[in-house]
Structure formats: structure tokens, C-alpha cells
Image (cartoon, grey):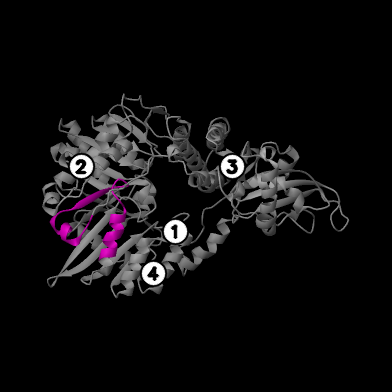
Amino acid sequence: MHCDRDLSALLFQFRVLSLAKDRSLPLLERLRYLCICSNNLDEFFEIRMASLKEKIRNKLLPNPLLEELVAQTRQLVLEQYEILNQELLPALKSEQIQLKNKSDWNPKQRAWLKSFFQTQLLPVLSPIGLDPAHPFPLLANKSLNFIVSLKGQDAFGRRLEMAVVPAPKSLPRLVQIGGEGKEIVSLEQMIRAHMSALFPHLKVVNSYQFRVTRNSNLSVDEEEADDLLQSLEGELTSRRYGNAVRLEIEESCPDRLVQFLSNHFELQEEDIYRIKGPVNLVRLTALYDWVDRPDLKFPALIAQPVSITFQSLKKADRALLHPFESFASVCDFLKQAARDPHVLVIKQTLYRTGSDSVIVDHLVEAANAGKEVTVVIELRARFDEEANIQLASRLQEAGAHVVYGIVGYKTHAKMLLVVRREKGRLRRYVHLGTGNYHPKTGKLYVDYSFFTTHAQICEDVHQIFLQLTGLSKRGPLQKCLEAPFSLKSGLLEKIERERINAKNGLKAGIKAKLNALADHDMMHALHHAAEAGVSIELTVRGICCLKPGPNLKIYSVLGRFLEHSRVFYFENNGQSELFLSSADWMSRNLVQRVEIAWPIESPELKARILKETFEIYLEESRFRFELQEDGTYIASDLIKGSTGAQNRLLDAYRALVAPVSEPEQLHQGALGIRPQFCQ
């Protein structure tokens, strides 16, 4: 019934890689998928593999699991470089986009590259000869480095055989020859070609690129930390130099040098990956941005603007589907609140928002205007800790009240509460999201935004904010479900209700769209419900530890945009319930985080979301994978004419979304789209 979550995570990377293999996709998009897969694998080693190794050392996990994970990662890496070397690079070359090796440089290019090296690279490189006075340097996580084999005597007449050359992360990993054009040289090729300039009067026998991946888990004891912000700031530096968990090294590197490096980093053979190509594929993402070839990319996204005003929200709830409808609408709503003289209070949670976020700009503006601004900012959002620390400081300087969340519980709920004085009374406006308040990911992730003045939902959000800032106990929420209190138990009750309905011959069914499913209680409940006859359809993009069976189908959908929304539907014998949420069905979300799920009660909105989330995705087979009972995924048989759910939604929004008058919006249930889209 269940499978290991880490094996499931690796299977997801194979599905991402399958998009890099898909020759029907634009060439530069295929390259981008390859880079995404590589980046995901980096994070897998930094977080998951590092944790697993620690557990195995403490005899909390069996070695066979690690052996299986190593076998899967080796296969994944092998396929990555096969796709790069055998398909993508030749295809790029045929499009006159070429990563040129030293043997390909003509005299004019050699002269330009030599000058570039001497003026732009040589001044910032620091070769380190290895001898008793110069021990092996401390190398940063995922940094590019070279192990250099030398012959000759150093400046002091001593024999020098080996050196290390770190390439600072400030250096560009790709260089356009002549500063422009489509002929490109990688940083490793540049440094290798001019390595002798770093060791005058010594013979450079050869040099080999390598990269070490380190444990990036932070180890702040929140209970003991007097100041969480200061404690995290101290830990961020150590993340760059945690224990090594993986060594990537050039395939041609001699065994004696590989052994030397593995001994230094205290790694085993299973941790060494011999690479046939650049040791960091993620850096090839720069090609995507540099090359101005729209024919080799997806068509430009034209997100539909939607006006969200206080006046319109008094009349009806609104829901937006990003990125098809612009995330700028959320930013504009916050700007409107910041500048409205009748707005008294703004409260917001921030998990990931970006280091230069317009969201924070508007919050700062509101605080400077004298409004009461309270921001619950999650300092421990993985790999965004540094950006969030900077944003917290900026907000505090503007006079906003900044709270760092709850010790032991990450605040992952996405909530915005605006309090406005209208005709002598206070009215609340709420925005809730399945995704982050991040304008960049708002263009890349499929997520829902929900705006409402519903009194009970607004009161629930108000109570959660009081809990986050005042830490006080509160009574049950009226409409919403909140982790770690009522969300898990509420979902389990709804699943059990569907099971009982099915046993009694009543209408029963469950549909859910998630990023991940691994909570054991949720999986057991779904399994038993399916056994009782409940029809269950799950779309789980990434990790899924539940296996399918009779009445239980599980899909994974990929595409141009990251499927990120969380939507839960329960048939309830004809009295159906639909929830949007910030939470996946993982134990960490349901037990160890502050999360929220809220109901969609408008019949028009409910019909629209069901159509967009479930019907279209199950009608469109392209980029849909079905989980098998043996734990493998099989791409769905391509239905004739299928272009993929995301493409269908793109086409629908381009064709159907149009500016409409306020009365027409009300007639359409405030959807802002023509009714036939929901039929």
C-alpha cells in the first residue's frame, strides 16, 4: 500500500527528465527541464540524502534503502548527461547555439578569450598549492573547483605536485565570446585553457573540475534560541560548509586524485559521481535567458489582468487561477489597501516572497502611511532564510510589527487581512492563496487566489492572526480548517464520512489535487475508503507514498508551469464540499505547520474550480502520468488532439477572458469569464 517517500521523490525527477527528452517540446525548454531536474537533485542530496546518511549512521534506517537510492540517483545522472551530450548539445549546435571547446576556438576567439581571462578572471582566482603549510582549502557547497596535477619546483625550490583552484561563485559560469552572440564558452573551459597562467614556472600536467555537495540542513535549537533571527543568521554561514554528502568529478580524473578527494571529504565510493560534462548543469539555465530565439521557447505568457476592488468584493467572492490570471492583481489589491485612507489595518503572512518583492514595498508604504501593519514572516523557509531575514529587518525599520511565527511550527498559511472603515463600521477583506506571495513564482506556478468578505471566513482568519501574534488559545473555527489543530482531523472525518456513505449505498467520492502525499493516517483512510467503494481520484505532482488500487487512481501532471495548487473535493451524498488549501497531505504540513484550508461555497466558483482542476486535467492526457501498483509511473496514452491541460487553459483564458462590466461580473458569479467555460 505504501512506498518510501525518498524513492518517490526520485521517481518524480525521472518524470521531469522525461520532459527534457520530449522532442515535441521547444529545444530551449527541454534544456530548462534538464536544469530543473539537476537543481532538484542537488536539493535532494543537500536535504534528504544528508538526513538519511545521518539516520543510517545512527542505525535508524537500513542500508538497503540507501543502496536503492544510490542506484536510482546514478541512473538519473547517467540519463541527464546522455540527454545533454547526445541530444541537446547537438541540437543546439544545429541551431547555431554552441558551447565551444578549446579545440573549436579560432585565432580571433583565442585572443579575445585570453584577454577576457587576464582581465576578468585571473584577478579573482586564488590557486592553492597543497603542502604542509597550505592544507586543503575549505570549499563552499556546490562551488566549482579544480584539482590540478603539477610538475616542477615552487618559488621556494620545493617539489609541488598538486593544487586546488576554487572558482568563486561571483564569476559567470558561461561567457559569450566577444561579449555577444551565440558562441559560448563555459567557465571550466576558460580556466582549464589558461591554467598555466596560474602556475608560472610549473608544468600543469592536467586539471579536473569537481564539485562537492554538503549537508544544508540548519540546526537551530528554537527552544534555546533567545533571538531566532540572530541564530539563523549564524547558521546560514555554516550551511555553505556542512558535511560533504556527494562528490561530482570529471570522468577522466585519475583514480589516485579521486581517492585523494574522497578521503579528504570522508566520502565512500557510493558518494562519488564521475561526470561526463559540466559538473553543474543548473548553470546552463543562463543559455535560456541569453538566447533570443522565441521559436525555441514556449510562446510568451500573456496573463489576464483582473481588477479586484473593495467595491466588487462586497458583492461577490472572487477566485483567480495563476498564472493564467495575473498575480499582479493580488499585488494591486495590496497596493490599493496601502493607499486607501479608509484602510486601518493590514495583516499578512509571508513564507516565500523574493528579496526584492513588490509585496513588501506595499507593506512598507502602508506602514509609512501610518496604518497598523503586522507581518508574520517565516524565517525558516528553506533556502529563503537569508532573503526573509532582510525583509523582516526592512519591515521593522518601516514601523511594521514583525512576528517570526511559532517556535516548532513553520507558518505556511498564505493569508492577507485588510480592515477598512466604511460608513462608521469596520469591514474585513481577506485574501487566501494556495501558493506564495511571490510575484515571480506567480508567473510560473499554477495556484489559486481567493478573495472574500464572507463574515465567518474573515473572522476565522482574524482569529488565526490573533493566535500567531498573541499565542492565545481560541475556540473552534467556523468555516476554515487549521493545522496543526483541525485540518488533519477534519479531513479524516470527511474521508470517513465518504467511506460510510459508500457502505450505505449513498453517493460518495473524493478528488484531490496535491503536491505531495505521505501522511500515514491520510493514506490509511484513503485506502479503507477505496476498499469500501469510494471512487477516489488523486492528482499528486511529486512525492506520493500511497499506491493505487481498485477505486483508487493516482496521477501526476507536469507541464510548462509547476502544478502547485491544493484542492480537495468530497461528494458528501450530493451535498458536495470543495476546499482550497495551503497544505499538502504530508505529516509536516498537517502536524508541524500552521496551514489553512477554506471552503468554496459559491456554486459558480465551485463549478469553475472543479472544471479547471479535475475535469480538464483528466480529459487531457498529455504530460499526465499514472501511478501503477508496483510504484512506477506510466505516461498516459496520448488521446488524439490532446495538447495538455495547461495549454487548454492558456487557450481558454486567451479566448474567453475579456473586460466586462460590473453588472455582467455579478451575473457570472464574479468569475470574469463567459459562462460556457464552466459548462
Residue 378 visible in the displayed image: yes
Q: Nearer the viewer, residue 639 or 2?
A: 639
Residues at marks 1 and 3, CA–CA distance in whole angstroms: 41 Å
Magenta segment boundaries in residue numbering? 307-336
Asked if disc 2 and disc 4 are in contact, CB closer than 8 Å, the reply is no
| Residue 673 image offset from top left, x and y in percent | 19, 45
**Is residue 331 rendered magenta in the image?**
yes
Q: Which label lies toward us, 1 or 3?
A: 3
Q: Amino acid at mark 2?
A: Arg
Q: Which residue is mark 2?
A: 608
Q: Is residue 194 above or below residue 12?
A: below
Q: Earlier in the sequence, mark 2 or mark 4?
A: 4
Residues at marks 2 and 1, CA–CA distance in whole angstroms: 35 Å
Q: Which mark is residue 395?
A: 4
Q: Which residue is mark 3?
A: 183
Q: Quadrant of the N terminus?
A: top left
In the displayed structure, does residue 527 sit left or right of residue 82? left
Query: Number of labelled discs?
Result: 4
Q: Nearer the viewer, residue 158 or 237?
A: 158
| Residue 307 image offset from top left, x and y in percent | 23, 55
Q: Which mark is residue 380?
A: 1
In the displayed structure, does residue 535 sit left or right of residue 622? left
Q: Amino acid at mark 4?
A: Leu
Q: Earlier in the sequence, mark 2 or mark 1?
A: 1
Rendered residue at 84%/54% (across/down): 154
**Is residue 457 rendered magenta in the image?**
no
